[in-house]
Amino acid sequence: MKSSSIVNIAHSHTEARFRVASVQHIALATLLAVIVFGAGLACAPHSLYFDAADSVASRHLVKFSAAESNERERYRWSERGAIVLLFGLTRHPLIIDLRMTSPRPPNAAPAETRLGLGSWRSNAFVVEGDWRRYRVLLPPRPGAPDLRLDMRAFRPAKARDTRELGAAFTRVAVHPVDGLPAPGLAIATLGGIRTVVLLLLPIATFVVMSQLAGRVLPWFAAAAVAGLVAVGAARPVDAVALLPDLWLIPVGTAVGAGIFWGIQSHLSPGLAVLRQFLASDRARLACVLVVASVQGIVFLTLVPPWHHDDEPSHFEYVWLMAFRPSWPAVRTPDPEIAQIGGTGSALSHFPTYYLIVGLPLRFTSGLTVIEQLYVARSVSLVMFVVTVAILGGIARTLFHEGHHMRWLMPLTAALIPPFANIMTAVNNDVGAILGFSLFLWSVVRIIMLGWSTRRAAWVVSAALIAAAMKNVAVAAIFIAPLVLVIAVGLHRRWRWKPLIAALVGAGAVILGSILAWGDPAGWYRYGAVSIDGAARAVVSDSDTPHGQQAFRLTSSISLYDDFSGLATPIASADVPLIAGRTITIGAWVWASHPVTIAGPGVLYNEGARPAVVMTPVIEASTTPRFVAWTFEAPEALSSLQVFIPAPPPAAESPVTLFVDGVVAVQGSFSADTPPIFDRSATSGFWEGRPFANLVRNGSAEQAWPYVRPEVDSAARYLVRISLSRIAASMFDIERTVPLILFDRVPDIIFRSFASLGWGRLMLTGDIWLLALNFVFLITVAGCIRLAVTHNDRSSRRIAIVVFLVIGLLMWMNAVLRTMHAPSVQPPPLPRYGFPAVGSLTLVLAGGWLAWWPPQRRTIGIVTLVLSLVMLNALAYSTIWWLRVVYNAYASSG
């Protein structure tokens, strides 16, 4: 016994010596990494300089022709859409020095040029036909590495040369304005997150190799990696190009996991204490709430004042609720707070959220407006933490005790940067997300735990609370009765067929009360057009120009739109072909009595500018007459609709307008010779020339459903969007399905994870869009795999299905919400889908872990959490640089 004790004691002393030695070795490896990295920073250049014809220039020049030369110069021509990649240099103000020329044919327009960086654009200047240097001051734009060369292009005189050229470049030089020393400029170029990852890379190599090999090899490997890192520090622009922001997430995750794996033996005592502390679900959720609180505080303090979505307008509403005794009037700003730019635009929202936030604000009358803003943001922060706690309650209801989803689901939500961003803003979306999350909790509880009067009352109350916060959550009122039907069916053990039949019947009754049949297919309603019924009628007159149907338009006063009428969008693929060319719009027009009115015209957007309506003035009689006019489409045309304006409302003699055979074709045609259509009115002959009609259903022969005008008008106050145009978008499968599948859905997935700052700053590059959508598709496929392999009919499965279906409906609303105008559409905003953030996190976390076997599931959890942490690190650094820019501009002016 004595000898055994001596052996054990000696063995423990050996382990202790090895552990101390390993810590010392790790400290030495860390010191080596810091010294070598510092040496690399000391060798970094003070500026960026390269010749356009050199091979290294291809890393920076995008959409430039191959290098050319003459007897004096070597150069590259820029083409349309040319970009100069500056990578992390754009974090600081820069002076860019471009040596270029643009000799052009005699008939070509001058080389008018603007430089663009993010949202900034320079003043216009002309590049002359001889070699000159052009120096431009660039403002700091973190997260925008692409310097755009917006230059008027020309085609060379050679017939075989089809390039659209801008200017010829020989040299590009970039200098920091603030004169940073080389190490400071290098770190600014790399960015904080990339700098930390590069510093930790040799350390991770050392600790991993120490586990795999002994003694000398880890040092050689760490030294080799440290040398590469030093080269990256000495050439920061190349390091950013080789390790872009997207790769920081997997590389940073691998580095963190490698260090953790290599030093886990030293962390065993601490990990044991941590496991004991987190042994219960309650303790894990408490830890998640601490993480959510820290996350919220970071976003609350990082984002500059007034830089959240519509924050001035929403704070104005809160302030008026707190400090004014009378109810605020819509669109009537208060002079005392007018300097924040609220303009009274949010005063039409439901007041519930603003009353809640305004309560603590009543005690801050002695504070400045900025300090009061942060008090209001703090109330939103509390709602954020409460929402995460509710998500924990949902996960606790859905999953058994000890299940990892009980804490992983709320943690995933807390670590989604755009979600934390909006939940720390002064915005009624915060209240809508909180209220709808509470409603979802009541839904899963009544399905999982069974019917009771108290749970049913909770469902109804939570639906009312959600709807009172914001119109985006009004859907809870319509979903609640269906949920109660499901709960009653499960309680009484109905068979599935009667239950489904009851739900389908209820849905049919609801749709029948909302929809009617008879509007012209492919046409969207604006304003108060044809409020007495369908905008399409059977015309019995034998002189009907085409077919047996015609557009029928009556008018009334619209409280929401600036104009009334019907519009059909021209296919997006045709818009670039139309831009800068002449279009002829024509139609047969007649009215219930002779009148002078606006005839068929266009509704178009030029770039991102607001929509413009152009219509001719025509004389309409009681017999069909063909009218036509020409429209010169602008070069920057971004969308085009053919628009039939409704007649103006008249109290004494209301007018009914009839239109048939609407046509829009490229080229100039006369109204004296009407076109001859084929049977479908999609093509024909005009003035003896064949043409293709750009207008769909130009004779109103095809019909589709429409929202009853009285329902649309009543719902407009609640939902603040046109249900009629939303429904038309859903029925317009030819246009909407490709747009949703290949544009809107990928965009909203991307924005849900990578829209930073105030929602308009995003991680740049198409690779981010592809990568995030690819990962999300993997998680969706994982959920489908789980559904197939776990085929049971338990209440838990039903609750999860209902939970996900409701989430899908809310995210569909976010996708379709901005499609109500077929003109240039704003991007889909994830804040309209975040009321169902619980469904998103369930798909993300559950679908990701579905691909990991049980014995490797811990690795899957660590990978997911570390990836979200790295994504947040990128968000923090980006917003931090933006705050630096904001403070710099605020102090200068």
Image (spheres, grey):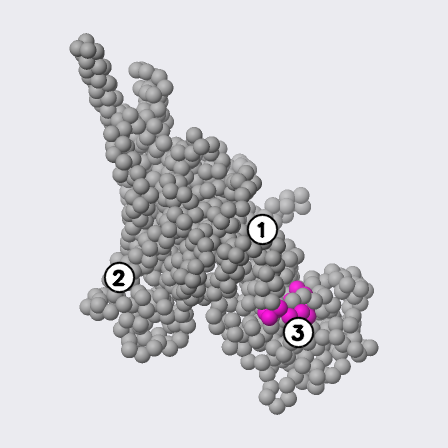
Residue 85 percent across, percent down from the top left? 44, 43
Check disc 3 and give the amino acid type.
Ala
Residue 539 percent across, percent down from the top left? 76, 76
Residue 80 percent across, percent down from the top left? 55, 49
Question: Looking at the figure, which quarter contains the N terminus?
Answer: top left
Position of 461 relative to 593 (above/below): above
Left or right position of 328 against 62: left
Residue identified by numbered label 1: 741
Q: CA distance from mark 1 to mark 2?
A: 41 Å
The residue lying toward the viewer, choosing from 465 and 361, is 465
Task: Using a 10 Å C-alpha cutoff, classify the residue at mark 1 as few (fewer than 14 neighbours), some (14 to 19) or many (20 or more).
Answer: few
The residue lying toward the viewer, choosing from 700 and 856, is 856
Q: CA distance from mark 3 to mark 1?
A: 30 Å
- Residue at figure coordinates x 67%, y 81% from the top left: 656
Quarter assignment of residue 66 = top right
Q: Please tell me the numbered disc located at residue 534.
A: 3
Position of 755 relative to 681 (above/below): above
Check disc 1 and give the amino acid type.
Leu
Answer whether labels 3 and 2 touch (C-beta < 8 Å): no
Position of 68 relative to 687 (above/below): above
Q: CA distance from mark 3 to mark 2?
A: 51 Å
Q: Secondary structure at mark 2?
A: helix
The question of residue 547 being in magenta is answered with: no
Residue identified by numbered label 2: 375
Highlighted range, magenta: 511-523
Count the labels in the image.
3
